[in-house]
Image (tube, rainbow, N blue to C red):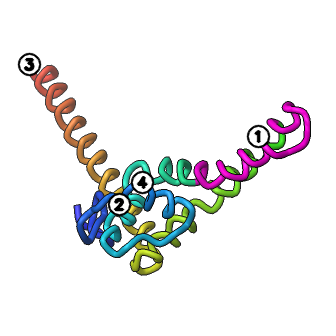
Amino acid sequence: MTGPAGGRGASTGPVVRPAPHRWLWYAFGGRLPERHRGWVLHDTTTDTWWLRHVVRSLVQMSVPIVAVVVLLPAPWGLRLAAAGGGLFLGMLYSLAYMNETTEHRVMKAGYPAGTAQAARDSTGLMRQQEETERKRVAAAKRADRYRRRAGG
């Protein structure tokens, strides 16, 4: 499928996965080198883009959450409650701004604003069309079977 950003898997260049240390930099909001440009678009438009966003958010929150649990001078129950509350609020904000955050990552990689959303929309439309066609063909087969039974 071809769409605004190159289609399903939406990449206009080679998809070169970053090394673990570069991925950590990327997860914390850093810009990747130009050779990873296609991977950034893939990362933000693939079928699991939302799950990847959640993982990046959890990685970002791990540092303050661990700091609260380890350094807070309080009973363990309070430490864990504070960490859980922080995790809950952090995920709430992360999910609320998921589209904007992924779009910003794509813009950092050099793509125009709206590229990731357009690619996801295009992929969704293609899936919808494929499903509609599948259902149309199945309905035509059922109708044909019914006509043969009724006529015979």
Label 2: state its secondary structure: helix
Asked whether the beta carbons under mark 1 and mark 3 sit within 8 Å of each other, the answer is no
Q: Position of residue 89 (x, y in %)?
A: 75, 50
Taking the magenta stretch, the answer to whether it contains residue 70 is: yes
Residue at image coords 31%, 63%: 10
| Residue 113 in the figure: left or right of residue 33 | right
- Residue underneath mark 4: 20
Q: Earlier in the sequence, mark 4 or mark 3?
A: 4
Q: Earlier in the sequence, mark 2 or mark 4?
A: 4
Can you tell which mark lies on residue 84?
Answer: 1
Name the amino acid, label 1.
Gly
Which stretch appears magenta?
57-80
- From the image, state whether disc 4 or disc 3 is nearer to you: 4
Number of numbered callouts drawn: 4
Q: Residues within 10 Å of mark 4 (few under 14, many from 20)?
A: few
Residue at image coords 81%, 46%: 71
Q: Earlier in the sequence, mark 2 or mark 1?
A: 2
Asked whether the beta carbons under mark 2 and mark 1 sit within 8 Å of each other, the answer is no
